[in-house]
């Protein structure tokens, strides 16, 4: 049976804005998507239902200007033990979106150019970039009981990690950029639901150790294997880390820059321009408040006079 052709411009980028500390990077992320891609992608900021009322009014106004939909989700759906804030990305991913593709982004990511997802088909359970280093499962035998839980054999394919020795390992992905087909595969299985089921079952298994904070990453390839189909391994240009990168390096070909901390973000001209665009987009009567909220992202940065 021929696979239904996907409209790769029917896409939602979404992220989790879980509290005040995540609001400013969320604005920078949303600005970067709008600047790089224009008006066509949907952008959704998910916030736990219990925190929706606490979102700062400056953040709300700027998200409205950026055409970002703020939506709530139930972060009490599962009682992670011990607590697991990373699990919110899995819970938010389960929410329904109207587009054909969905891409989760950590808030410490900015979009510097149009991502290329043209190879994604209805039979793609997951598209993501390999992790930098083997933070979990360095020994392949660690994975055997994980896959066996779901009646699966160890995968017969490998990925090359993107940092250091660039080891070749069993499928292991960075969970800062996670893409999937929104409506699921031809069998009707939807990746976020399988990811959630996989993660909660692994978490409950006392035979699997060292799961914090790697549970989201451990469960990603296993969920994809349960779905079937072909995982698309993205290049590191779609989840680019500043690891061992000097501040003079050009990011011309980078699509999604995973800067990880403000000190790295403010080193690069592409990121500084993104900050300036956000300030320029702010109404004049709101600009000083946006500037104050940028705080550490502006440390040591000289802004153009018109943005002061």
Image: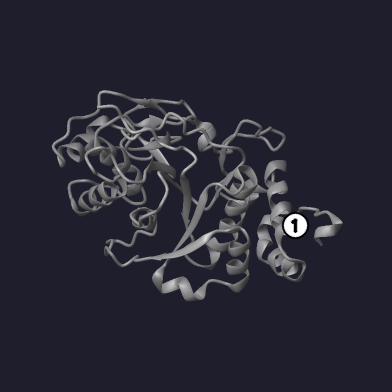
Q: Is residue 121 left or right of residue 206?
A: right
Q: Quadrant of the N terminus?
A: top left
Q: Is residue 272 above or below residue 160?
A: below
Taking the spot 38% from the left edge, 30% from the top edge, the residue there is 232
Which residue, given by chain and number where applicable, does mark 1 sit on? 280
Where in the figure is residue 115, as x and y percent of width and height?
A: 53, 36
Residue 242, percent from left and from top: 59, 38
Relative height, residue 131 to residue 156 (above, below): below
**Extreme residue in the left direction:** 151
Q: What residue is rendered at 40% in x and 44% in y?
A: 100
Give coordinates of residue 214: x percent, y percent.
Answer: 35, 47
Residue at image coords 71%, 48%: 272
Task: Report the front residue among 70 and 171.
Answer: 70
Front residue of 102/244: it is 102
Q: Is residue 268 visible?
A: no
Residue 122 locus on image (x, y percent): 33, 35
Asked if residue 171 lies left or right of residue 161, the reply is: left
User: Would residue 105 be found to the left or right of residue 229 on screen?
Assistant: right
Query: Residue at left 16%, top 41%?
Result: 150
């Amino acid at each position: 049976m021929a696979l239904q052709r996907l409209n790769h411009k029917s896409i939602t980028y979404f992220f989790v804005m879980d509290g005040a500390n995540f609001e400013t990077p969320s604005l920078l992320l949303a600005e970067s998507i709008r600047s790089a891609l224009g008006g066509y992608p949907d952008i959704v900021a998910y916030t736990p239902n219990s925190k929706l009322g606490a979102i700062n009014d400056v953040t709300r106004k700027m998200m409205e200007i950026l055409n970002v939909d703020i939506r709530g989700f139930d972060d009490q759906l599962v009682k992670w033990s011990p607590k697991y804030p990373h699990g919110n990305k899995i819970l938010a991913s389960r929410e329904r979106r109207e587009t054909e593709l969905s891409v989760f982004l950590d808030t410490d990511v900015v979009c510097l150019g149009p991502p290329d997802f043209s190879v994604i088909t209805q039979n793609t359970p997951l598209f993501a970039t390999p992790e930098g280093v083997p933070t979990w499962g360095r020994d392949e035998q660690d994975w055997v009981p994980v896959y066996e839980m779901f009646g699966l054999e160890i995968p017969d394919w490998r990925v090359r990690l993107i940092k250091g020795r660039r080891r070749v390992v069993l499928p292991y992905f960075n969970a800062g950029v996670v893409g999937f087909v929104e409506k699921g595969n031809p069998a009707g299985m939807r990746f976020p639901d399988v990811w959630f089921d996989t993660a909660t079952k692994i978490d409950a298994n006392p035979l699997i150790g060292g799961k914090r904070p790697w549970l989201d990453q451990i469960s990603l390839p296993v969920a994809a294997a349960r779905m079937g189909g072909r995982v698309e391994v993205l290049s590191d240009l779609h989840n680019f880390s500043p690891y061992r990168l000097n501040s003079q390096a050009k990011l011309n070909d980078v699509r999604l820059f995973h800067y990880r901390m403000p000190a790295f973000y403010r080193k690069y001209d592409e990121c500084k321009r993104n900050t300036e665009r956000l300030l320029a987009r702010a109404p004049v009567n709101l600009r000083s408040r946006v500037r104050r909220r940028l705080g550490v992202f502006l440390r040591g940065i000289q802004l153009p006079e018109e943005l002061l």
